[in-house]
Amino acid sequence: MKKTFTALVAATAMIAAPLAASAEDMVFASWGGAYQEAIKKAWITPFTAETGVEVIEDTEPQVARIRGMVDTGNVEWDVVTGGGSTLMQGVNFGLFEKITDDMVDQSDVLPEARSDYGVPSEIFSTVIGYSKEAFPDGGPKTFADFWDTKKFPGKRTLPDKPSTVLEAALLADGVAPGDIYKTLSTEEGLKRALDKVAELKPEVSVWWSSGAQPVQAIGSGEVVMALGWNGRFQAGIDEGLPIEMSWDESIAQVGYFMLVKGAPNREAGIKFLNWITKPEHQAEFSKYVAYGPTTPKSLPMIDAERTARLPSTDERLSHAVFSDIAFWAQHATEVAEKYTAMMQN
């Protein structure tokens, strides 16, 4: 009997061993909250169901933490998320693996969104949000309107970081969309943008640091308009706040998924990156958050009601300036210092 039991255990172990060896998992780090919950529902759960790859989630993938992992050779994350500035900072520090066409098929991705070191995950936009109670007959439509305190009186709120604000300021000052970054790249152009923002300082009651703040400020009546993220404004609208957005002008930004250099589960990470770029999977994300797909082929798969909430339709992108992540990677520190000085003086 003992012999039979021992043989059974041995046989079971032989069967189990290959199964354990073939199991895959990966670690994914994002920013928590509704955004990460949307990623889980739209992509992580169905990806695991289809491929069998288990995705372990973590949060707060700051560049400093990623750099610490890569520099020490103790990489715990495989795929991380971030905006353009996170992507380019990481590239400058050598933290992300270059994404080749052989690794990830990005043929369906918008050319304006593509990067050699990150897979575009979604498009979101900085837009004007305004109080329908303050402007029942229609509020500001363009960035020039946002700066027009006589035609549209009342307190404003702006981000406490310069990205997208300086672009909006130059558009308000009459710079052509195609000349925004050429202008910002000069000392005179940067001063022009900062001076334009400074014009609004008497009417800026809040310099916001969290995406929820402009929504709350409009909802409470503290301000009558704000520059903020479309997804945040849409969430406020869905909660019943008297907010309207203008899509006449916007600054489009791209979210990215990056493969960390030295990722312990590299192949599983690559599978995941390929999975999220498929148009049918990109279309799913908009069910859970008002951010648009990076693949135009996804749009016909999204119903009209959801499409009306998204920043990446052909019509809205035709009025958008894409944030230039290469510019911000090169000039972020210098510009941030001058922007902070402008706010404080």
Image (tube, rainbow, N blue to C red):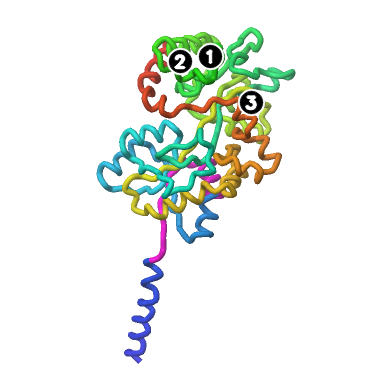
**First to last magenta residue range:** 22-42
Q: Would you say residue 241 sits in the magenta stretch?
A: no
Residue lying at the far right in this picture: please name it: 137
Label drawn at residue 247: 3
Q: Quadrant of residue 63?
A: top left
Q: CA distance from mark 3 to mark 1?
A: 18 Å
Residue 247 x %, y %: 63, 26
Q: Quadrant of residue 225?
A: top right
Q: CA distance from mark 2 to mark 1?
A: 8 Å
Label drawn at residue 175: 1
Question: Please, is residue 331 above or below residue 75 in the view?
Answer: above
Residue 315 x %, y %: 65, 30
Indicate the quadrant containing the N terminus: top left, top right, bottom left or bottom right.
bottom left
Q: Type of residue at label 3?
A: Trp
Q: Quadrant of residue 234?
A: top right
Q: Circle 3 sits in a helix, a strand or a loop, which is it?
A: strand
Residue 205 appears in the picture as rendered = no
Q: Would you say residue 37 sits in the magenta stretch?
A: yes
2 or 1: tag closer to the N-terminus: 1
Label drawn at residue 183: 2
Question: Please, is residue 155 above or below residue 48 in the view?
Answer: above
